[in-house]
Amino acid sequence: MAGVRRHPEDRVSAVPTDRRVPGITRRTLLGTGTAVAALSVLGTGAARAATGAAAGATGAADAASATGPGTAAWDSARARAYAFLDAAMDGYPGHGTTRLAQSYADQAGLFSTAFTYDNALAVLAHLAHPGPASRARAVALGDALLYAQAHDPQYDDGRLRQAYNVGPYVFYDGSPQPDGFVHADGTVNVGTQFGFTGTAVGDMAWAGIALAALAERTGARRFLAGAVRIGTWVETNARTDQPLGGYRFGVDGANNKLPYSGTEHNIDLVGLFGRLARLTGDGVWLRRRARAAAFVGRMWESSGGFFYTGTNDGVTINTSPIPEDTQTWSHLALRDRRHAGSLDWAAAHLKVVDTAGRPNSTVPSGQSYEGVTFSSASLMANEDAPIAPSQPRPDRNGVWFEGTAHLALALRERHAPGDARRADRLIASIERAQDNLGQGQTVGGTALPARSGVVSASSPLDTGFGFGYYPYRHLGATAWYLLAAARLNPLR
């Protein structure tokens, strides 16, 4: 995610239901006391000095043509995806109207966790849908993010935490978590059980992008004010004058600044700062955008045609693993023709086809899915060992559906010969996954609507960054599918 989501990228792994000790993910790294895991976040392997660094599955085409834009199947698939977004938002009706959406189905083992990144994507996906009902949901989620800014239990500086609880549950150790998103004292319910208490620049950027989009759509000044507070927090807390420049990761749960910087995070800031420049008319945001973009440019490997993941110390560039989202988001944010080949690198070097006959695949018999995996390390995962203690063994060909949607949207944006057809194949694969994978899952104990919501991965997938993705229905993956289907680029 994000993901270096996250999206270090700020994405999260879904935890199997038999798990009792939550695994370290790029999200949990931001919890109190977890700042030591920089290598897990930004990759390991060879590092080079910053000095001198250069600024399908058979039959898928038929499926794509049968479910293309304007067809009844296409509209039905999107309607079911929105039904999942609604169910994730409405999982705890007895716990107030100020609420965020639960990120994963209950079966993932993360209980009522609502990640800031996922909810920002849900805002953008709702804004991509015409009609007052989706707009009202986008506004409600945006207001919940503003509420979290204003009612943090410790800080009043515009930050948002990595995740919040949005409903009651009993944790693995037997301790109850009885509240919804808002405690009785009015403060927000920060996700302390899993250590999701830090603040990542990527999460903040996506929340700011969502609030800025709401400001533009609704004209409500409160949303722009919230986005500006986010941008100001990033400038104050994450700007670095280290040799590679740009912006660093953020802070952990104890408010310690983290020293590493991610390509993906700086891409996110290109999107946020660009929006703020346009909406406020203040040139300072263009200068900050240029700073983030310069960092991204320094991560380019011209000989291979891809972007590296980031740096642990601001001086050396980590050269392994190579993640998917830096390749696709860079094009969505910058649309730099000199670097457009990163999409071809991702499509060729991260391509996977997951079938039922593969080792450790959980794909049902007779089905197959094509797309991309999370990183170059995912393709070399040890299929004889669990992803982490108490987790299943990985499938090297597990499809990461969120990343597959990134690539589909970026190909549509580039629109080179053959891109539209490739994008359609990827979208068709995601829609087949929504139809067939993750059946019988729930949110807040309530069954999800049939065939609604996209799972994180077709089979257990080792990201190579210390965590995995699994076949649980996911708010972020579903929102990215909807953005790709609508051809809406949130980073432009």
Image: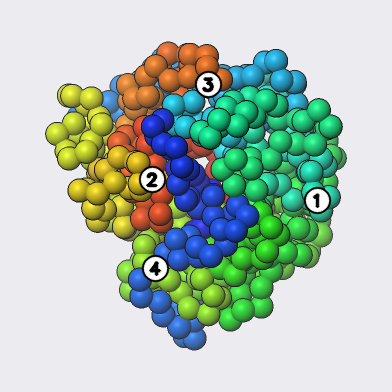
Give the residue drawn at x 45%, y 83%.
49
Quarter holding residue 221: top right
Left or right: where 388 falls relative to 277: left
Q: How far across and how far down the image is residue 126, in percent? A: 61, 28
User: Horizontal and vertical percent for residue 77?
Assistant: 43, 20
- Name the amino acid, label 3: Val
- Assess disc 1: are there few (<14), some (14-19) or many (≥20) residues with their C-alpha within 10 Å of its C-alpha: few
Residue at which label 2 appears? 468
* Residue position marked by numbered label 3 in the rendering: 443
Q: Nearer the viewer, residue 394 or 320?
A: 394
Residue with the most extreme bottom position: 51
Secondary structure under the numbered disc 2 in the rendered image: strand
Q: Amino acid at mark 4?
A: Thr
Q: Is residue 6 visible?
A: no
Label 4 crowd (10 A; few <14 / some 14-19 / many >=20) = some
Disc 4 and disc 3: Cα gap in Å?
36 Å
Label annotation for residue 155: 1
Q: Identify the residue shown where x is 71% and y is 47%.
A: 160
**Residue that carries the numbered disc 4 in the rendered image:** 44
The disc, 1 or 2, on the residue closer to the chain's N-terminal end is 1
Circle nearer the N terminus (4, 2): 4
Local SS, label 1: loop
Closest to the observer, 314 or 28: 28
Q: CA distance from mark 4 to mark 1?
A: 33 Å
Q: Which kind of residue does numbered mark 1 sit on?
A: Tyr
Q: What is the three-letter code of the residue carrying label 2?
A: Gly
First in residue order: circle 4 vs circle 1: 4
**Contact flag, marks 1 and 2 (Cβ < 8 Å):** no
